[in-house]
Image (cartoon, grey):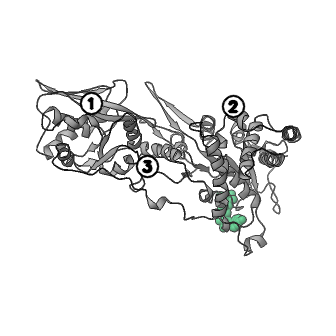
Amino acid sequence: MLVKIFSGAVSGIEATTITLEVNILNGAQFIIVGLPDNAVKESQQRVDSALREIGSRIPGRRVIINMAPADVKKEGSSYDLPLAIGILAANEQLIPEELENFVILGELSLDGSLVPIKGILPIAINARNENFKRMIVPKENANEAAVVKDLDVYGFSHIRDVVDFLNQKKSVEPTAFTLDQTQQEDHIFYDFKDVKGQENVKRALEVAAAGAHNLLMVGAPGSGKTMLARRLPGILPPMTTEESLETTKVHSVAGKLSRNCSLVTARPFRSPHHTISNIALIGGGTFPHPGEMSLANNGVLFLDELPEFHRAVLEVMRQPLEDRKITISRARYSVDYPANFMLITSMNPCPCGYYNHPSKECSCSEGNVQRYMSKISGPLLDRIDIHIEVVPVELDKITGSQEAEPSKSVRKRIIAARNIQTERFKNHSGIHCNAQMNSTLLKEYCPLSTQCLSLLKIAMQKFGLSARAYDRIIKLSRTIADIEQSTDIQAQHIAEAIQYRSLDRDSWGH
Ligand SMILES: Nc1ncnc2c1ncn2[C@@H]1O[C@H](COP(=O)(O)OP(=O)(O)OP(=O)(O)O)[C@@H](O)[C@H]1O
Ligand SMILES: [Mg+2]
């Protein structure tokens, strides 16, 4: 008998429905057609062993399985369960009536138990969009799929339970989604109130967080750069539902969702070590998977000690920083991963670390300072909206007992500013904040008065700012105006934004 079973395949972070047609004919052969990879072909062994555990087996006849559409690559072991169910139904050991309402996924181990798989969330979203009502997945994946509304998700630990459920011998309730409580960010581990002084750097981090702008901190060893960056997660605004789903999709595909975290609700803060390889940062590999840049989607990618990273690694960041996505091409297909992250970086100003230091003498020659700076290429620097110098605070201040503003109250201002942006971009899908504005949006939402324009012009000439810095300054001013709850961009907003371009100035290193 010919039966149809529905399943799903993921490419990038989007999914397509896969139809498995299973037929049993006279003969003796097991054939799978429709662009399956080796792991799919090997499923015959796992399926047979699992079926034997429940007193069945792959019939010793000609079993033909067609996976459609034929042009979509089917990878991995997630088709074990739908294949096993298809074979049982084709062999009339299972009532197939209801099968067309289900999307089925899961890897089988040899004893018939179900093993969790990657990429459940995009498949569940696609299933709901294609009007499927029910989904069968391994128990560990059930909560992840249950995030999707209007889809009944049933989680099982053994193929026996799936068969009993489909034969209506056992009734099972769909999984009710539960949000992991440990992710609620009320508890702030690293608080801004521990950082003495550094008001200007804190302000720069506040502006960066409010509009998701990229930021570079330049300062002497021990000036507090790492300390300040570690405190950024505590002031980031919560994610909107749309952002949360976007980020969870990437983590789902990468298999990075932990057992008790089915929906990423806190913005990611990724801080890879400087020895990281190209592939680990960007994504790729034989079976393409997302890298750190994509795992940081809608959150922060923190690269501490920027000049220590391999130059090649830094250069490949240029394209994703512009396009906010990464395309990985293979001979026969290509996949896209989102890379909508906020880049936070730090570096020393020179090899000895004390250039521009208020009390210590820098022992580097002028050429050495410039050579050190040039490790960060101009085009990369250009993509960083905020450059800020971190000057060590005096000893009196560090030892003083005065407490600084806590992260909680800084975060309130940031949330208010971000709410303005959510409202501003509500009709622009995929755009959530000011940093993501393209030039058309910039023109629409950032009109400048003649006073602002002339101020900008004077500053550009005086500080020798590059023409490319122009748009960045306007975007930043928009965010500063949002923090101030000001509808218009005013001269003082432009003036503050100009200060954040210190490395563009012709004077640096001379
Ligand atoms: N403003 C400050 N308030 C309180 N503590 C500070 C401050 N600045 C520095 N410190 C102390 O100095 C330590 C060193 O700071 P941190 O490691 O952040 O420096 P850094 O700028 O990253 O240095 P490096 O360039 O060597 O990596 C901090 O852990 C903290 O204890
Ligand atoms: Mg450091």
Q: Nearer the viewer, mark 1 or mark 2?
A: 2
Q: Nearer the viewer, mark 3 or mark 2?
A: 2
**Which picture quadrant has residue 439?**
top right
Residue 115 lies, in percent from the top left, at 29, 48
Q: Which mark is residue 20?
A: 1
Residue 186 is left or right of residue 8, and the answer is right
For the point 14% across and 47% down, which residue is it?
53
Q: Secondary structure at mark 1?
A: strand
Q: CA–CA distance between discs 3 and 2? A: 36 Å
Q: Residues within 10 Å of mark 1 (few under 14, many from 20)?
A: many
Q: Nearer the viewer, mark 1 or mark 3?
A: 1
Q: Residues within 10 Å of mark 3 (few under 14, many from 20)?
A: some
Residue 314 is left or right of residue 79, and the answer is right
For the point 78% across and 68% down, which residue is it?
394
The answer to whether mark 2 is within 8 Å of ligand 2 is no
Q: Quadrant of the N terminus?
A: top left
Please report whichever mark, 3 or 2, sits nearer to the chain's N-terminal start: 3
Q: Is residue 338 visible?
A: yes
Q: Residues within 10 Å of mark 2 (few under 14, many from 20)?
A: few
Decide which of 175, 227 is in the foreground and name it: 175
Q: Is residue 345 visible?
A: no
Amino acid at the residue labelled 2: Thr
